[in-house]
Image: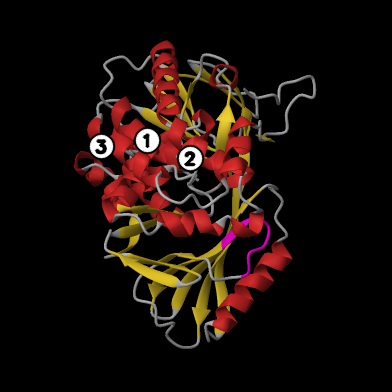
């Protein structure tokens, strides 16, 4: 399968090959098509569809005004605000919220790229700064290559996992939701901090995701399906069908050795470059910012792209110290069944602070405000957690590759 548009430059060596058609790779491709249309860019994706099976959601405050034109065509649903619910209280927030689906991402890529520049169902065996070797042995050359294939684990890093199953439920009657429920933590606390996330796509269609901040990356799919069904039943929803299902296991970063993590000269993007908010695992804000930045480069050679992506990711790592500290406290200082208290306290803070937190742009004043007052975890446990090493976030070489600083 490939894009539908004709390509007047078909056969010419591309200026850039993006490997991986997930969110990060797709956004880079779309940004180049929008802001650098004179360049030939090719996208290679192992799956048959761009984006796989995913729903990505974000707050309007996550995306700068200058970059909104890139994201706008991808939005499948949007709402004027959202709710959170914890034992003892519910809060409604006014920050606009939106969702991008795999279908909307796939459609946007196929509309933006000429037929010969999109390669789906194609696996990559190896790659370098200016070349890609496909599984069938074909070698493709380019001015530069970006590896955006994603990652289920992060070498030389430690922390925990955010894991989930989401289902789009078709109901027999309206569900009654008018806006997303980003966190419903009134559910039984199992396997770490557990909450349910709901997106009302229509009056009778709702996406329900059962999410865990867990020490263990394992997913028991039959059990999760049962829990989603039980949640729907408890809300009085009669499920006629499950229209869609997705699962995910995302690293929550508490600490690591960035220098050891980043090895090699090939440019990286997305989770493969650790471009995520360390505590929430949100990747869309960073993916948008990095994609837009790449379009401003006057030199897209493989060597320049490698240096640029390394420096961008290294700066992101330095700026993420505060969020990694909170991740360490969440996983190390609070008993698993009590982790919800940290998030409950956080959601009593001012709304602009919450917006900056999710966007990964907390100010020093924000950081102080998050930490002052009665702590949601015992002081002694917090200190002990900050001195700990954490659990490795990848299956690594037993000779010591899993050790983290």
Frontmost residue, 180 versus 336: 336
Inspect the magenta stretch and tell me whether residue 193 lies in it.
yes
Q: Residues within 10 Å of mark 1 (few under 14, many from 20)?
A: many
Q: Residues within 10 Å of mark 2 (few under 14, many from 20)?
A: many
Which label was assigned to residue 29?
Answer: 1
Residue at disc 3, secondary structure: helix
How far apart marks 2 and 3 lie (CA) works out to 17 Å
Residue 296 drawn at (x, y percent) = 25, 24
- The number of numbered discs placed on residues in the rendered structure image is 3
The residue tagged 2 is 21
Residue at disc 1, secondary structure: helix
The prevailing secondary structure element of the residues shown in magenta is loop
The residue tagged 3 is 34
Frontmost residue, 184 versus 221: 184
Q: Quadrant of residue 200?
A: bottom left
Residue 225 drawn at (x, y percent) = 66, 69
Left/right placement of residue 31 relative to residue 398 reads left
Q: Quadrant of residue 400?
A: top right
Q: In this picture, which residue range is highlighted in magenta?
A: 188-194
For marks 2 and 3 on the same chain, the one whose residue lies earlier in the sequence? 2
Left/right placement of residue 331 relative to residue 323 reads right
Q: Is residue 46 visible?
A: no
Q: Residue sitting at 30 percent across and 28 percent down?
A: 293
Q: Quadrant of residue 219?
A: bottom right
């Amino acid at each position: 399968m490939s894009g539908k548009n004709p390509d007047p430059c078909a056969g010419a060596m591309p200026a850039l090959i993006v490997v991986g058609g997930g969110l990060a790779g797709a956004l880079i491709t779309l940004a180049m098509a929008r802001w650098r249309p004179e360049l030939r860019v090719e996208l290679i994706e192992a799956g048959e569809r761009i984006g796989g099976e995913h729903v990505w959601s974000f707050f309007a405050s996550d995306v700068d005004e200058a970059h909104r034109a890139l994201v706008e065509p991808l939005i499948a649903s949007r709402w004027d605000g959202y709710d959170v619910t914890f034992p003892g209280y519910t809060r409604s927030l006014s920050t606009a919220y939106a969702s991008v689906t795999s279908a909307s991402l796939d459609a946007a890529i196929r509309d933006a790229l000429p037929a010969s520049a999109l390669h789906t169902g194609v696996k990559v065996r190896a790659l370098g700064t200016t070349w890609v070797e496909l599984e069938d042995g074909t070698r493709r050359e380019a001015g530069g290559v970006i590896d955006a294939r994603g990652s289920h684990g992060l070498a030389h890093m430690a922390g925990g996992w955010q894991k989930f199953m989401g289902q789009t439920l078709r109901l027999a009657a309206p569900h009654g939701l008018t806006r997303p429920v980003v966190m419903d933590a009134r559910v039984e606390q199992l396997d770490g901090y557990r909450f349910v996330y709901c997106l009302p796509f229509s009056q009778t269609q709702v996406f329900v995701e059962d999410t865990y901040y867990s020490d263990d990356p394992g997913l028991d799919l039959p059990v999760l399906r049962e829990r989603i069904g039980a949640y729907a039943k408890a809300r009085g929803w009669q499920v006629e069908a499950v229209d869609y299902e997705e699962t995910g296991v995302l690293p929550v970063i508490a600490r690591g050795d960035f220098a050891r993590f980043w090895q090699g000269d090939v440019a990286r993007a997305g989770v493969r470059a650790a471009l995520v908010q360390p505590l929430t695992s949100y990747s869309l804000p960073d993916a948008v910012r990095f994609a837009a930045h790449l379009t401003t480069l006057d030199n897209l050679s493989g060597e320049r792209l490698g240096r640029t992506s390394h420096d961008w990711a290294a700066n992101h790592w330095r700026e993420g110290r505060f969020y990694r500290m909170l991740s360490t406290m969440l996983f190390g200082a609070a008993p698993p069944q009590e982790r919800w208290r940290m998030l409950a306290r956080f959601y009593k803070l001012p709304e602009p602070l919450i917006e900056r937190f999710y966007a990964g742009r907390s100010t020093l004043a924000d950081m102080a405000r998050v930490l002052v007052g009665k702590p949601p975890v015992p002081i002694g446990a917090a200190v002990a957690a900050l001195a700990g090493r954490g659990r490795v976030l990848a299956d690594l070489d037993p000779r010591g590759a899993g050790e983290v600083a």
